[in-house]
Amino acid sequence: MSKLTFGAGIWHFATYVDRYATDGYGPPRDLIEMIDLAGQVRDLSVVDINFPWSADVSADAVETALKRNNLSVIGITPEIYNREFSRGAFTNPDAGVRRRANEVCNQAADLVRRFGASYVKLWPGQDGWDYPFQVDHRKLWRLSIDGIGELASQNPDLKFVIEYKPREPRVHMAFDSVARTLLGIEAMGLPNVGILLDFGHALFAGESPSDSAQLAIDHGRLFGMDVNDNLRAWDDDMVAGTVHPIELFEFFYTLRKNNWEGVWQLDQFPFRENGVEAADMAIDFLKHIDTALDRLDFEALQAAQDRQDALSAQKLARKALFGI
């Protein structure tokens, strides 16, 4: 079994609101409370933290809470997807709002340095469009590339990761797939921009997460990853391995095969479930996957794949993962 590092987005430990339960699924929690909950999860050692915080939460207080819970920070996620950026962050038609997005991301970059984190995570969920004829597609794509490229050029000492997703909150996001995101990154031409591959987003996009990971690795751009699960029709952010365990196994097989090393990170939204229990359950399954990879006959599997022998490959994978 390899030495693993497990992480989670701090939002995993928040309380949630949807368009029906407008009062939320529990009392609101501040960032410090969420960090203290994260500290209760077995084997969890790093967190991804949203920014900005409420005015009464200081960086010193966050640092104290992290130390109290033996946690470190892997990334800072600037909130460039909230109401302020409802018409876009990097692609907003208002140049002043675009400057504000750059400012928020640069503040997040300063926090990455302070906490010794690995990257600024960009999820430009409002960058895109909703209706036919709404945007000039060439201009919008150029704004997407230039906005992130400017930010990465301003901070050459840091990594920036783009988390793509087909839709939500915009009906169509600009960075909607692994291939389109790689095209954008290559157009930027900067070494410090890469992809954070969300397993559930790849499912939602109709991709094979394993194939998406291989493509990003082949281009040298897989800087991070999140895992969760869904029913493919939406970004449900369910507990990892509860719906697509065999595809999750293939995803981590691809990472192991390519000697990719990084944090195995959760991006889950346990609306009605206990957040600590949901994280423990996911991490227990991820540990099982890691052990199954040790059992998997890589040479026999490669031979089956060279023949494109689906049944033989499935038998090898199922035996390693399920013991059948």
Image (spheres, rainbow, N blue to C red):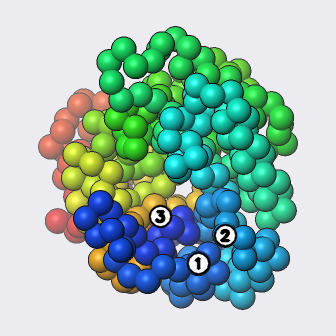
Residue displayed at 66% across by 69% down: 54
Residue displayed at 22% across by 68% down: 323
Nearest to the observer: residue 60 or residue 212? 60
Q: Which disc, if any, is residue 266?
A: 3
Q: Earlier in the sequence, mark 3 or mark 1?
A: 1
| Distance Cα–Cα, label 1 vs label 2 | 8 Å
- Residue 116 drawn above or below residue 130: below
Mark 1 near mark 2, Cβ–Cβ under 8 Å? Answer: yes
Nearest to the observer: residue 95 or residue 272? 95
For label 1, the crowd category at 10 Å Cα-Cα, with few meaning under 14, some 14 to 19 and many 20 or more, is some
Amino acid, disc 1: Asp
- Residue 10 drawn above or below residue 172: below
Residue 214 shows up from this direction: no
Element on which disc 3 rests: strand
Q: Quadrant of residue 47?
A: bottom right
Return the residue at label 2.
54
Residue 85 x %, y % = 56, 42
Q: Quadrant of residue 294?
A: bottom left
Q: Earlier in the sequence, mark 2 or mark 3?
A: 2
Q: Which disc, if any, is residue 180?
A: none
| Distance Cα–Cα, label 2 vs label 3 | 24 Å
Residue 88 x %, y % = 54, 35
Residue 106 x %, y % = 78, 46
Task: Answer left or right for 99 relative to 202.
Answer: right
Amino acid, disc 3: Leu
Amino acid, disc 2: Ser
Residue 248 x %, y % = 34, 54
Mark 3 near mark 1, Cβ–Cβ under 8 Å? Answer: no
Quadrant for the C terminus in the image: bottom left
Q: Which disc, if any, is residue 30?
A: 1
| Distance Cα–Cα, label 3 vs label 1 | 20 Å
Residue 17 shows up from this direction: yes
